[in-house]
Amino acid sequence: DVKVTQSSRYLVKRTGEKVFLECVQDMDHENMFWYRQDPGLGLRLIYFSYDVKMKEKGDIPEGYSVSREKKERFSLILESASTNQTSMYLCASSLHEGGMVGELFFGEGSRLTVL
Amino acid sequence: QKEVEQNSGPLSVPEGAIASLNCTYSDRGSQSFFWYRQYSGKSPELIMSIYSNGDKEDGRFTAQLNKASQYVSLLIRDSQPSDSATYLCAVVPGAGSYQLTFGKGTKLSVIP
């Protein structure tokens, strides 16, 4: 069974803390994505990666960075967490080929609360 | 800014009826189109993909694409209470793009 696993389902952090969200996929997918989902705003792309060590900014990269040292692992980093980063974070992966880029497999999500 | 628009709903249909969900997109060069279903408190899951004009059927689901009108729809036949969820339309803007743009979703309620 294909799987995208996010390291933490629920996190509570304080303003200014550094936060790591990790995501691992076992499908040998080239593409990996980090989205955040907020009520009324939908899914917004933070960063994506189409290959190891490659990264591209999405629509809302400010305040975030990412790391992809291995094909199966994509990490999202909040250098200094702020209350407006309280959200549901979703990791996803997909194949590289043609339209399958858009056939995303999502992890279960990480709900981050910043106090 | 590439946009994908959906009616937020809620859309309520009686059990056994056809539910019709609609989506428009702004980028005329868009190549690939997807419908995701998201149950409350869960992650989105892919239910349909469509790449060429016309209809694509999979069980009770039919996706319809009209590139000239920049319109994609999802029909759910014989709707069941278990179909109650938010349906997200998503578009890959063009060839060579990796970035999927999502609509904000339509909430569907199927009334027993």
Image: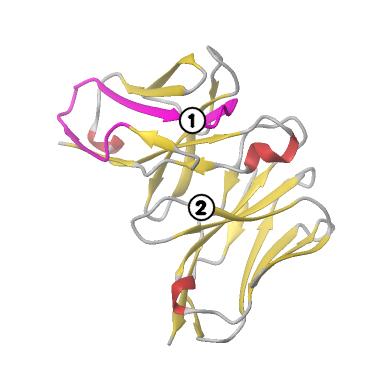
Q: Is residue A60 left or right of residue B27?
A: left
Three-letter code, disc 2? Glu
Q: Which of these two is toward me, B79 or B4?
A: B79
Q: Give the quadrant of the C terminus of chain A.
A: top left
**Residue B24 picture location, percent across and down:** 68, 59
Q: Is residue B103 left or right of residue B31?
A: left
Residue at image point 42% right, 20% down: A66
Q: Which mark is residue A26?
A: 1
Residues at marks 2 and 1 on the same chain? no
* The residue stretch that appears in magenta: A7-33
Three-letter code, disc 1? Asp
**Residue B22 picture location, percent across and down:** 64, 67
Q: Which mark is residue B45?
A: 2
Q: Is residue B8 left or right of residue A99?
A: left
Q: Which of these two is toward me, A97 or B97?
A: A97
Residue A73 appears in the picture as rendered: yes
Q: Which mark is residue A47?
A: none
Between the C-alphas of marks 2 and 1, the distance is 17 Å
Q: On the image, which quarter does residue B75 sit in?
A: bottom right
Residue at image point 79% right, 43% down: B29
